[in-house]
Image (cartoon, rainbow, N blue to C red):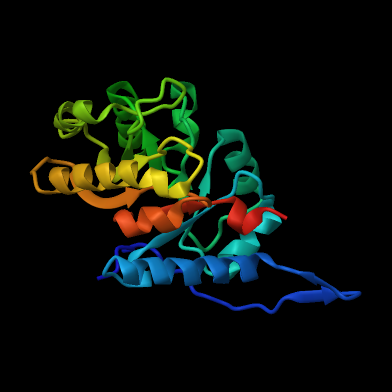
Amino acid sequence: MAIRPWYMGTKHHHSQKITQGVIHVTIADKIKRVREAIAQAAIESGRESSDITLVAAAKSADADGVRQAIIAGVDAVGENRVQDMTEKYAQNAYTGTPLHFIGHLQSNKVGKVVGVCDLIESADSVKLLEMIGKKAMELGIIQNVLIEVNIGREPSKSGIFPEELPRMLDTAAAINGINVRGLMAIPPILGNPIENCYYFETMFNLFVDIRGKKYDNVCMQFLSMGMSGSYIEAIRAGANMVRIGSAIFER
C-alpha cells in the first residue's frame, strides 16, 4: 500500500542533452536513475517502489532546479535552511509538490515554517513541538512533524536519544496543533555505507516498536532516513522516506 496520502507526483522521462559531443545529464535523468535504484532496493526489502517517498533535498538547488525536479516527478522537496526556503517559495518554486523542512529548526524561525511546509522532519525537542503547536493553532491548522532521533548519539547533531522518545511522545500526545507522523534520523557518516546498516536497522526496530503502541496525535507512518550515499541501505533496512540531494542536483 502506498504511503503518500497527499502526494500527487507524476513522472516524466527526459532524454540526455548532447552539446558538441558532450553528454549533459539532466536532473530528470538523475531522478530516473535514483528511482530505478529505489525500486530495486524496495523489491529487496519486500516492498514496491511506490512505498518509498522520494524527497529532493534542495539545499544546493536554485528555484529552476527545484522546478525541474518537480516536473521529473519527485514526491516532495526538502529544504535545510529557512532563508533558502523563503526565497524559493517567493519564486513559486514548490508549486505542485509538498514541501518538507529537513534542517535544524531554530525556535525563532518556527513562524516562517509552520503552515508553509507540509511536513517538518526535524522536531527535536518538546519546546520546539510546543512552539510548532502554538503557531499551528494560531493558524487554525494541524502541522505534521517527524521526531528527529540522534541514533548515533553524536554531540554535533540535533535530535533526541532513543531512550527519550517514549517520554517525548507522551508529551506530544497532549500538544494541540501537531500530528507526529513518524521518525527521522541522520546516522553517523561512515567510510562504508554498509556500516550504516546497524544504525538503520536500530532505527527501524525503534519505529516498529513505537508503531505498536498507542499515542494520541501520533501516527508512525514515515521513517525518514538515507541520503545520496546511503539511501539504498536505508531502504533495505526499512526506510520509507529518503532525502536525496547531491545524486539529483550535483553537477
In this view of the protein, can residue 181 be seen by the observer? no
x 36%, y 58%: residue: 235
x 49%, y 60%: residue: 97
Residue 17: give x, y in percent of width and height. 77, 75
Residue 175: give x, y in percent of width and height. 21, 31
Q: Nearer the viewer, residue 193 or 169?
A: 193
Q: Nearer the viewer, residue 235 or 140?
A: 235
Image quadrant for the C terminus? bottom right
Residue 25: give x, y in percent of width and height. 71, 68
Specify whether 88 is left or right of 36.
right
x 41%, y 27%: residue: 158
Count all numbered tags in the image, as a single digit.
0
Image quadrant for the N terminus? bottom left
In this view of the protein, can residue 85 be seen by the observer? yes
Specify whether 39 is left or right of 56.
left
Q: Quadrant of residue 172?
A: top left
- Extreme-right residue of the structure: 20
Residue 184: give x, y in percent of width and height. 35, 42
Q: Quadrant of residue 94?
A: bottom right
Q: Nearer the viewer, residue 105 or 158?
A: 158
Q: Quadrant of residue 183?
A: top left
Q: Nearer the viewer, residue 139 or 178?
A: 178
x 29%, y 52%: residue: 222
